[in-house]
Amino acid sequence: MGCACGTKKDGKVSGCDNNGACGTGGCNKMNVFDWLSNMDMPSEDHFNIAEIRFKNGRKDFYRNSDHISLHTGDAVVVEAMTGHHIGYVSMQGELVRLQMQKKKVANDDEIKKIYRVAHTKDLEKFEEVKNRELPSLYHAREVIRKMNLGMKLSDVEFQADNTKAVFYYSADERVDFRELIKVLASEFKVRVEMRQISLRQEAGRLGGIGVCGRELCCSTWLSDFKNVATSAARYQNLSLNPSKLSGQCGRLKCCLNYELETYMEALKFIPDVEAPLLTEKGEARLQKTDIFRKIMWFAYKEENNWYALNVDRVNEILTMNRAGKKPASLELDLEEVKIPIATLNSDLENLDRKFQNKNRNKNRNKNRGGRGDSRNPNQKNSGNQGPNQNRKNPNPNNPNNQNRPNPNRGK
């Protein structure tokens, strides 16, 4: 069975109710949302070409000339170069016309035909044919190793009628595989076709999960692989680390081109700083640039601090340097004159001096008063002295003050 969610109706398999997202039969590859499916289209102008999906996301356009009623996810039998093949309807209607215009596919007689909707027997036979693919891949790799061919075999796809097998390989140089085709055709008894693919196409066929946590773009929706250069990483300020910039295919990640135009538009407002900025403080070198915030970080040669400047300020400094001038620093054009601290606090110092002088005068007066009391404690009350207070002279050597007998003591 091609799709596990398909149901049988009159011996036929109906469409996938999950729009091919059930994960079986290869229908989880390259899902497409038909945003025109709910629109009423004129019945006489219905586009009769459908897009059919094959193994590992390979798609091609086929004409529904018999006007078979098809639904997204239906297994159909289509025309092949030799015989027939089975694929699944991935898109139909007007959306196919737009897709053909995008891929520049002409609507002519070279477009092959859709035969019919696949029956149960067709799907059972197709499953038996697909069971041969993995053993054939391993055996073909052994043959390539014995023949010492410089090629890497990545996948094998058998046609539904078991008459043809396509071997997908990748190689750095041209490989002569004529002898290999003869050996494989004789062993597998089928017509062998060797098809070279790029490393990105190989990763898309094998599938996988990217570092973003989602399925690879090349295995889900990306079919047009554009050239990716290392300049895309430089414009986005990414570190040029090959292990981080390379995808599972070993080439630069395709997603580096997704936002490149936005970065290129934003870089128009960022000045080119090819030399250090010259200031009186020293030379400042560019360290980092935030493109969308328009902020650039600079650092002096002998400092570890980074200074954030907007784009306008950087342009001003560059203009001054071209004119032979240097600003005082990255932030200021002229250095501010520093006022001494003593001048700022002069009024406070004057008040301190004033109070210090007052305290000194008070201390002096106190010291003077204390020395006078020690010399003559009765100096203050000298006017009120009694007759007997100064009877004894402190100087005993004065002859006028010698002790004389009191004449009245005997009376």
Image (cartoon, rainbow, N blue to C red):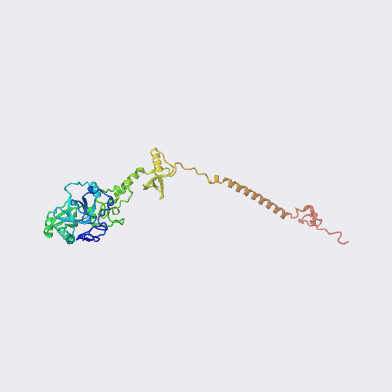
Residue 225 seen? no
Q: Residue furthest top?
A: 323
Percent of width and height locating residue 329: 43, 44
Number of numbered tags placed on the structure image = 0
Find residue 411 and report its horizontal and vertical position in percent.
Answer: 88, 61
As displayed, is residue 268 above or below residue 250?
above
Q: Residue furthest right?
A: 411
Q: Residue at x 12, y 60 (%)?
A: 187
Residue 159 coordinates in the image, percent (x, y): 16, 57
| Residue 95 percent coordinates (x, y) | 25, 49
Seen in the picture, residue 396 relative to 337 is either above or below; the reply is below
Q: In terms of depth relative to the viewer, which is nearer, 223 or 65? A: 65
- The reply to whether residue 384 is in sight is yes
Closer to us: 106 or 74: 74
Q: Is residue 370 left or right of residue 399?
A: left
Eyeballing the image, is 334 above or below 239?
above
Res. 410 image quadrant: bottom right
Q: Is 150 or 177 nearer to us in this picture? A: 177
Closest to the observer, 327 or 288? 288
Is residue 254 found left or right of 367 in the rendered image?
left
Quadrant into which the N terminus falls: bottom left
Q: Kindly identify the residue that appears in the image at 24 percent across and 52 percent down.
A: 91
Residue at the (79%, 52%) spot, across then down: 383
Say left or right for 163 vs 348.
left
